[in-house]
């Protein structure tokens, strides 16, 4: 066989028949996902939800809502953090074209189309689509909603600390430091003087005094890796039985857990009622959510809390009888067998949702601004995570990359089994062809396969 050579210059064809066009065999993951969405009538439902935002007859037909929501789901399944990356990936992949319903002669949407539709549709429509995905999970038996775990993490905002300005007069940070230096007696301060002045100044990063003019919703906070950045805080309410995300809320990056838990609990309860499920009665969280207000609320509503209690020393309960009863009841529950089991499961189920959505899903750094705008994208990203739970039960993996890795593992195991099987055949054949060797003594009195020591060798 002769060696083929790559053509240095290739002249494009003016006409190309349909049969000569290279076609993709499709992707088994996306094909199965399309069938799941079709069984639940996903496209007609989202079209009914989006109909009030479009004209009935006038104007050019827009991008179908089902395509828009599918492209946002691709952001999670492919680990893409920006809508530009999503648009490029959909235009480049034949399998994703098939998933979206585009032929080879059709142009896939650009990132500007995704942005325009996201701004057109309000947050209620995105939350309704999130609820449609929860209904799919409920049909597959992946929602119980009795025990809910709550946790939060930080998202790095699309804004820089160097751009922050004063809330009162709009002064930049460096200009503000120069004013302080001149007030302290330094007429022409250098950068070293400004750094020295700013090093030990208290309250220099207060969100009450500073904001970013491009994204006022972003707050100065400490990220998970220890860096101080502008960020947002996302909070998940997780079904502890299946690991599905029942509700998602977005807050300021510096918002305390003890203040945001109430909004997340309310959102999770509303989703449970919308799905026809009973109200959640058990709530699991880490010690960042433990406070008197939380314990009072749990006690007054008759809820069972499993919240880790920080070591605060001896407490004084004068005038706080409700908080005392709630704290003592919570303490008894977390020390029991079920409480310890739920704490271990919280570290497994709740933390896993953040790992999939933010690390492998690519949403740790957001490229959008303003909280409502980010929440629209984030809700659909988490919807992809929930659909991944359904796909894990159907095809064994929750993402296309995971399915490809599973195929490689199966091929590797098959190859290993073939090698072992062939080696065993050769070994059995060698034992049958034993020939005596008078000069060879085998150790222990017995040789290969339990044969007595008579100087036999396999000859291999």
Image (cartoon, helix red, strand yellow):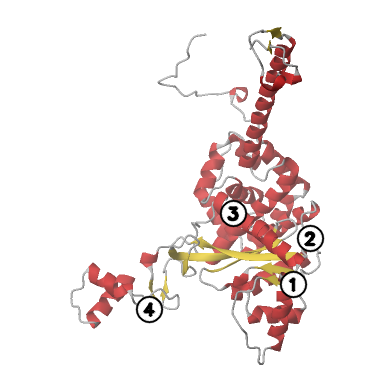
Pick whichever, 67 or 181, lies toward us.
181
Pick whichever, 206 or 138, lies toward us.
206
Q: Is residue 138 left or right of residue 100?
A: right
| Occupied quadrant, residue 268 | bottom right
Residues at marks 1 and 3, CA–CA distance in whole angstroms: 28 Å
Q: Is residue 190 left or right of residue 100?
A: left
Q: Is residue 246 left or right of residue 228?
A: right
User: Can you tell which of label 1 and label 3 is closer to the viewer?
Assistant: 1
Contact? badges 2 and 4 (CB < 8 Å): no
Asked which secondary structure carries label 1, the reply is helix
Give the labeled residue for mark 4: 202
Residues at marks 1 and 4, CA–CA distance in whole angstroms: 41 Å
Badge 1 or badge 4: first in the primary sequence: 4
Badge 2 or badge 4: first in the primary sequence: 2
Q: Could you tell me residue 66's position as x and y percent?
A: 66, 49
Badge 1 or badge 2: first in the primary sequence: 2
Position above or below: 271 against 11: below
Contact? badges 3 and 4 (CB < 8 Å): no
* Number of other residues with Cα within 10 Å of mark 3, as a class: few under 14, some 14 to 19, many 20 or more: some
Residues at marks 1 and 2, CA–CA distance in whole angstroms: 21 Å
From where the camera sits, is residue 142 visible?
yes
Give the labeled residue for mark 2: 144
Question: What residue do we see at 73% from left, 16% from top?
Answer: 428
Position above or below: 18 against 28: above
Asked which secondary structure carries label 4, the reply is loop
Position above or below: 215 against 83: below
Asked which secondary structure carries label 3, the reply is helix
| Occupied quadrant, residue 46 | bottom right
Q: Could you tell me residue 33's position as x and y percent?
A: 70, 43
Residue 333, labelled with which disc? 1
Give the labeled residue for mark 3: 355
Q: Residue furthest left?
A: 188
């Amino acid at each position: 066989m002769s060696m083929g050579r790559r053509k240095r210059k290739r002249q494009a064809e003016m006409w190309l028949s349909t049969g000569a066009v290279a076609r993709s065999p499709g992707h088994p993951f996306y094909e199965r996902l399309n069938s799941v969405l079709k069984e639940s009538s996903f496209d007609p439902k989202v079209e009914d939800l989006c109909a009030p935002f479009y004209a009935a007859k006038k104007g050019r037909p827009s991008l179908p809502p089902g395509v828009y929501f599918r492209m946002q789901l691709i952001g999670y399944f492919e680990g893409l953090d920006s809508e530009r990356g999503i648009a490029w990936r959909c235009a480049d992949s034949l399998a994703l074209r098939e998933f979206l319903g585009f032929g080879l002669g059709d142009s896939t949407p650009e990132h500007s189309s995704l942005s325009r539709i996201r701004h057109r549709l309000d947050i209620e429509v995105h939350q309704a689509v999130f609820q449609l995905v929860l209904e799919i999970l409920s049909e597959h038996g992946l929602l119980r909603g009795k025990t809910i775990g709550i946790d939060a993490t930080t998202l790095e905002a699309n804004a820089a600390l160097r751009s922050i300005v004063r809330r009162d007069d709009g002064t930049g940070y460096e200009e503000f430091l120069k004013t302080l230096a001149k007030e302290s007696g330094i007429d022409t301060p250098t950068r070293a003087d400004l750094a020295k002045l700013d090093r030990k100044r208290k309250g220099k990063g207060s969100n009450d005094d500073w904001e970013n003019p491009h994204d006022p919703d972003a707050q100065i906070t400490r990220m998970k890796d220890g860096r101080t950045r502008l960020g947002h805080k996302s909070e998940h309410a997780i079904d502890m039985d299946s690991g599905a995300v029942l509700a998602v809320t977005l807050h300021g990056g510096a918002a305390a857990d003890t203040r945001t838990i109430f909004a997340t609990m309310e959102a999770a309860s509303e989703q449970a009622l919308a799905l026809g499920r009973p109200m959640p009665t058990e709530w699991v969280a880490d010690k960042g959510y433990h406070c008197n207000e939380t314990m009072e609320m749990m006690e007054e509503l008759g809820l069972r809390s499993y919240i880790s209690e920080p070591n605060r020393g001896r407490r004084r309960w004068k005038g706080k009888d409700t908080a005392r009863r709630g704290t003592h009841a919570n303490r008894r529950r977390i020390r029991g067998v079920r409480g310890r089991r739920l704490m271990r499961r919280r570290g497994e189920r709740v933390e896993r949702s953040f790992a999939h959505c933010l690390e492998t899903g690519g949403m740790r750094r957001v490229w959008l601004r303003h909280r409502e705008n980010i929440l629209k994208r984030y809700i659909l990203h988490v919807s992809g995570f929930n659909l991944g739970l359904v796909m894990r039960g159907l095809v064994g993996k929750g993402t296309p990359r995971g399915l490809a890795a599973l195929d490689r593992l199966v091929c590797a195991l098959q190859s290993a089994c073939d090698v072992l099987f062939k080696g065993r055949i050769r070994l059995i054949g060698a034992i049958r062809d034993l020939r005596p060797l008078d000069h060879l003594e085998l150790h222990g009195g017995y040789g290969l396969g339990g044969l007595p020591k008579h100087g036999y060798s396999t000859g291999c």
